[in-house]
Amino acid sequence: MARRRTRTSPASQPSAAHDENDRNRRTPTAVVKRLSLYSRVLQALERDKVEKVSSSALARLLGLNSAQVRKDLATFGEFGVPGFGYRVADLRRELRTILGTNRENHVALVGVGHLGTALVSYGGFARQGFRIVCAFDKVVPGRALGPDRVPVFPIEELETRLRGLDLRFAILAVPSDAAQAVADRLVASGVDGILNFVPVRLHTPHHVKVHDVDLALEMESLCFYLKGAGDDFGG
Amino acid sequence: MARRRTRTSPASQPSAAHDENDRNRRTPTAVVKRLSLYSRVLQALERDKVEKVSSSALARLLGLNSAQVRKDLATFGEFGVPGFGYRVADLRRELRTILGTNRENHVALVGVGHLGTALVSYGGFARQGFRIVCAFDKVVPGRALGPDRVPVFPIEELETRLRGLDLRFAILAVPSDAAQAVADRLVASGVDGILNFVPVRLHTPHHVKVHDVDLALEMESLCFYLKGAGDDFGG
DNA sequence: TAGATTGTTAATCGATTAACAATC
DNA sequence: TAGATTGTTAATCGATTAACAATC
């Protein structure tokens, strides 16, 4: 586990625990997104029995620069072997540990409308180990949801149901006018990560991480790049 | 319509049409996303009968820097009045024109699984003028989808059905292994904007704009920031 | 006119990339 | 050893922010 190179200034290192939390907080979203991409590519390579991969091969697969790949990976340790590359299985395991996807993560869903219902059955979450274990809505449908028969509880029971669950994630897919109130209740129940599908800026305490997914906004961005590209060129 | 300030070098302007397309292609995604956000905030302000807004008020509402707001807006013209601010209705109209959301945009949906079905009924698209006018799937459900009764056609009919529709957007929500083939057919049918929900990097001609929405990736990013923030602190 | 706020320039900050010594 | 590829430094590029003259 010894480092191959000495640090420029070993004296400047704060305590280890503080160090890691700090690094996690400070790592830019762009880097984290790329880590997830690497992780997924490595999953495919491992499935195909590829044993080693170089930064330039990874870069090519994802349309990135190889220096960027090396830099991203080197943020968290020295996972490669100079002159050789990275061992696929090892690197994948490291990345999953870094991302926290090396174990099953339980998630609550609030808002069982069309989108919420679709998300329960969405295979992509399960594939990365995210498991929706319970759902809440104002109106409770007669039956459990999706292939996993996820139970749906009335929203009034949010606090009591979450109490024993040790669950830190929630997916928010309620109507706009309910979003802030529900978010407050989730946070009070110990949730500190919210994947927010509601087009509203949520106000939450500092330690809570909100990730917005705004489908209409994605559509509008796309629209911008299209608009004009082909108008009125009487071709 | 005269500019208030002279350009540093008026001679350096290329032809107008080339100029605009070029600008659209070069405008960074981050700026475009913010334009959509401004547009949405202005929609709310207009609904609340607010007539004027300053860059600093907009910045506060969205958690941005006021200089950034002014710079973003000034990219496309001089929409403000020094000493006064921006007229809400005017600015909103300008932004919608820039984004291309000042008119109804027709969209095709390919892949009517859980996610596709949810997207048809998702109110957020309709609210910004995006209308899903037809859908395609391998398996055609017995009935039309959602409140608008969107017809679902067999995927074989993609080319013939799209022929007369003057439709430039598509939403892709098919299984991973079908994604590239479907994208190719969409492009061949004249689609040049794809909102891609499939976790696969699509290869398309240069003029086609693909926007990836990767739900599992968003979840993984969130997971990174959570992991570690509270472990093992026997509190 | 005095006060306010724009559009823009210059300074800062951060992220990407090129280059290369270290090393397998 | 010779060839390859890492981790890292320094250079480049782009995006954000501060500051202010222009102007309503």
Image (cartoon, coloured by chain):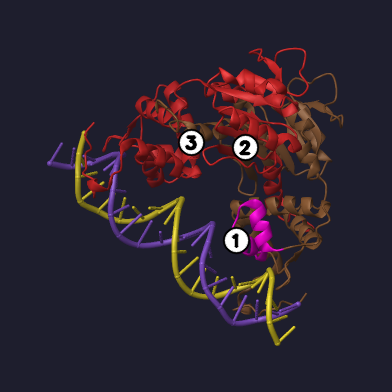
Chain colours: A red, B brown, C yellow, D purple
Tell me the magenta residue range: B54-75
Location of mark 2 (residue):
B213
Query: Quick check: B20 left or right of A5?
Result: right
Instruction: Estimate the x, y position of residue A148 in percent, counting from the top left.
Output: 63, 13
Foreground of the two, B88 or A42: B88
B143 vs A211: above or below: above
**Label 1 marks which chain's residue?**
B
The quarter holding residue B156 reads top right
Q: Amino acid at mark 3?
A: Tyr
Crowd around label 3: few <14 · some 14–19 · many ≥20 (10 Å): many
Q: Tell me if label 2 and label 3 are in contact, CB under 8 Å.
A: no
Mark 1 vs 2: CB contact within 8 A: no
Image quadrant of residue A167? top right
How far apart marks 1 and 2 lie (CA) works out to 26 Å
Q: Disc 1 designates what residue?
A: B68
Which residue is pictured at 37% across the width and 44% down the height? Answer: A71
Report the residue at 69% width, 31% height from top: A173
Q: Is residue A20 left or right of residue B57?
A: left
What is the chain identity of the residue bearing mark 2? B
Local secondary structure at mark 3: helix
| Callouts 2 and 3 on one subunit | yes
What residue is pinned by disc 3?
A: B225
Q: Nearer the viewer, mark 1 or mark 2?
A: 1
- Spatial separation of the CA atoms under disc 1 and disc 3: 27 Å
Query: Which sits in the foreground, A140 or A90?
Result: A140
Amino acid found under the numbered disc labelled 2: Val
Which chain hosts label 3?
B
